[in-house]
Image (tube, rainbow, N blue to C red):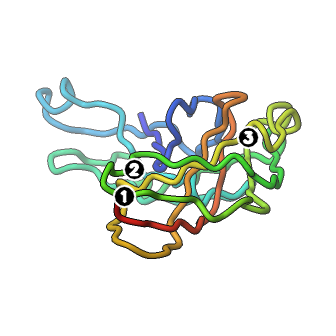
């Protein structure tokens, strides 16, 4: 069996809500009985949800481990994300929260709003979202800080459901003062 996995998956996100079609879901292989008995689903590639686009297709090479022979000589698999069940919406997010702030600094979030945050997911779930359904997270444990002002990466959590997610790169400005 062949399958894909996702990267940059938000906490609590239900990846089974992302529908996709693979050009092949399995291939016949030959190998020793011991290898066949230990065989698991072959992950052919990874799709990054942070840069995902509706309707996009991805092609992955099928690379088998040593000892396996691809009997059909199929060299790649195309994975398509149908447009029919997905949609996107742009939201202006004002709920911006600081996470993992060190106790020896006072950190103030200077950014008041992050504009045009693109959220993707099943159409009905996306249509039901409002800006209040999405929280921007500034996690300072992921960066080196000292006194000063910084533009830092922001991640998003959708609080209204576990089937929609934000795509793209966004930043917020923070001001750091030692205590």
Q: Which is nearer the eye, 128 or 171?
A: 171
The residue wearing badge 1 is: 105
Residue 18: name its quadrant. Answer: top right
Q: Quick one: label 3, few (<14), some, or many (20+) residues within 10 Å?
A: many
The residue wearing badge 2 is: 101
Name the residue: 49% across, 73% down.
150
Residue located farthest toward the top when viewing the structure as drawn: 37
Residue 9 in the figure: left or right of residue 35? right
The residue wearing badge 3 is: 121
| Rendering coords of residue 88 (x, y %) | 81, 50
Select label 3 or label 2 by which is in front. Answer: 2
Residue 178 in the figure: left or right of residue 4? left
Mark 2 and mark 1 residues within 8 Å of each other at the beta carbon: yes
- Image quadrant occupied by the C terminus: bottom left
SS category of the residue bearing label 3: strand
3D distance between C-alphas at marks 2 and 1? 7 Å
3D distance between C-alphas at marks 1 and 3? 37 Å
Residue 59 in the figure: left or right of residue 165? left
| Rendering coords of residue 151 (x, y %) | 53, 72
Question: Mark 2 or mark 3, which is nearer the start of the sequence?
Answer: 2
Select label 2 or label 1 by which is in front. Answer: 1
Select label 1 or label 3 by which is in front. Answer: 1
Q: Which is nearer the eye, 163 or 78?
A: 163
Name the residue: 42% across, 40% down.
27
Question: Mark 3 or mark 1, which is nearer the start of the sequence?
Answer: 1
């Amino acid at each position: 069996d062949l399958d894909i996995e996702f990267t940059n998956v938000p906490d609590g996100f239900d990846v089974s809500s992302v529908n996709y079609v693979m050009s092949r879901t399995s291939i016949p292989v030959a190998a020793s009985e011991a290898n066949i008995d230990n065989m698991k689903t072959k992950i052919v590639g990874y799709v990054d949800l942070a840069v995902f686009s509706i309707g996009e297709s991805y092609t992955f090479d099928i690379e088998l481990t040593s000892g396996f022979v691809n009997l059909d000589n199929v060299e790649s698999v195309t994975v398509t994300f149908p447009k029919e069940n997905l949609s996107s919406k742009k939201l202006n997010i004002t709920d911006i929260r600081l996470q993992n702030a060190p106790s020896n600094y006072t950190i103030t979030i200077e950014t008041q709003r992050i504009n045009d945050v693109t959220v993707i997911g099943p159409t009905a779930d996306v249509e039901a979202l409002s800006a209040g359904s999405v929280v921007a997270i500034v996690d300072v444990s992921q960066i080196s800080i000292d006194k000063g002002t910084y533009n830092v990466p922001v991640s998003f959590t959708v609080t209204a459901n576990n089937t929609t997610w934000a795509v793209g790169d966004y930043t917020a400005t923070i001001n750091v003062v030692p205590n």
